[in-house]
Image: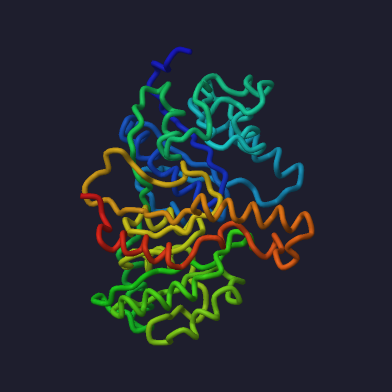
Amino acid sequence: MQNITEPPQNILIIQQRQLGDVAVTTPVFEAVKKAFPQAKLTLLTELKCVPLIEKDPYLDEIITFPKDKSFLKQIAFYRNLKTKHFDVVADLQQLPRCQLATLFSGAKYRLSFAPRHAYRKFLYTHCAVPENTEEYTSFSKTRVLAPLGLVPEERKPQLYVTEEEKEKAREILFSLGITENTPFITLDATHKHPKRRWKYYKELVQAVLAEYQSFKFFVIRAPGEDEQVKHLLAIDPKHVCMPEKPLSLRGTMACMSFASFHIGNTSAPQHMALALNIPALIILSETASFWHYDPKNPPKGTARQVEVRLSDEAYQKYLHDLQAYQEGKKTDFVPEEYPLINCITVDKALEKFADLLSSPFYE
């Protein structure tokens, strides 16, 4: 498969969703724009993802998939893509709407991962890179653009917050008793999937505060998640706080940019923390390892992400209890109430947090 020798003038990157996926795509924007500063770079994504990257200096335009699902609206949208005259399209997700956008774009060069289904290979002109390798996701996504001559690097995500947004964040934090001299931890204790919620956040917060009295916790959540976190506020109102109403995505980013550390198990906030260079403790559920930044040659001063993983012993015990339950020998074990993530102990998380405290940044 030959490389593309024509300098691109109008490039479309397609990353439909989710917030975390869009965050880890940001190194692609930088790599492309630095390689081809004269080219117009456009991102196609969902509307909900726009606030995350609307201040990215490497993007010239952001367009969104239509929320209106009517057939005529959809057709009009895809037909309009061709009028934008993209010469290169990179599909980084291969969802059905991504593939339709690639097809209708009319671009001469259409790049992606090797298709999951061979019959879809006709959609792309360059698709030699396998998807979901053990490489960090940003690195893998950048490799899709290798036919343009790009050399992938181990770059972390990058998000941009304005000074005005930071000033508003200072006001929010100050109202909760957090000044610029207050070390605080953003805590993401929620997840839309019950099986990916760790049930020991209260115990972890109590253990951290008992060991490190100077810290405060700033609880973050999305609209509709108050029930998942309200019990945390009862731990210690002086050391655990959150805004009365959920912040906007950009408001959360701005507040997080001042944090000393981040703790959580939802992918979007952990990618946001890394992009803002905030050291993070990740309570790892069943997410694949290539979603986590662990570079071989990390740039000095880059925030570390320390993972709390399920031990082999805990995993084997879980399987043993599950089998006993299925055989009717352990009636107090209900799989829906004991997801794998809850086999991770507070002591293990506290041990990993101490490790992060001792070396929060790569040296």
Where residue 4 sits, quadrant-wise, is top left
Return the x and y of residue 327 as percentages of the image width and height: 78, 55
Q: Is residue 226 left or right of residue 257?
A: right
Question: Viewer-proximal residue, 254 or 256?
Answer: 256
Residue 114 visible to an observer of this rendering: yes
- Residue occupying the point 52% across, 35% down: 132
- Residue occupying the point 43% across, 21% down: 147
Q: Is residue 319 left or right of residue 112?
A: right
Return the x and y of residue 109 as percentages of the image width and height: 51, 22
- Residue occupying the point 62% across, 21% down: 121
Q: Is residue 263 left or right of residue 326?
A: left
In the image, residue 294 above or below residue 216: above
Question: Viewer-proximal residue, 197 or 45?
Answer: 197
Q: Is residue 217 left or right of residue 322?
A: left
Residue 141 visible to an observer of this rendering: no
Where residue 93 sits, quadrant-wise, is top right
Return the x and y of residue 6 as percentages of the image width and height: 40, 18
Question: Viewer-proximal residue, 93 or 62?
Answer: 93
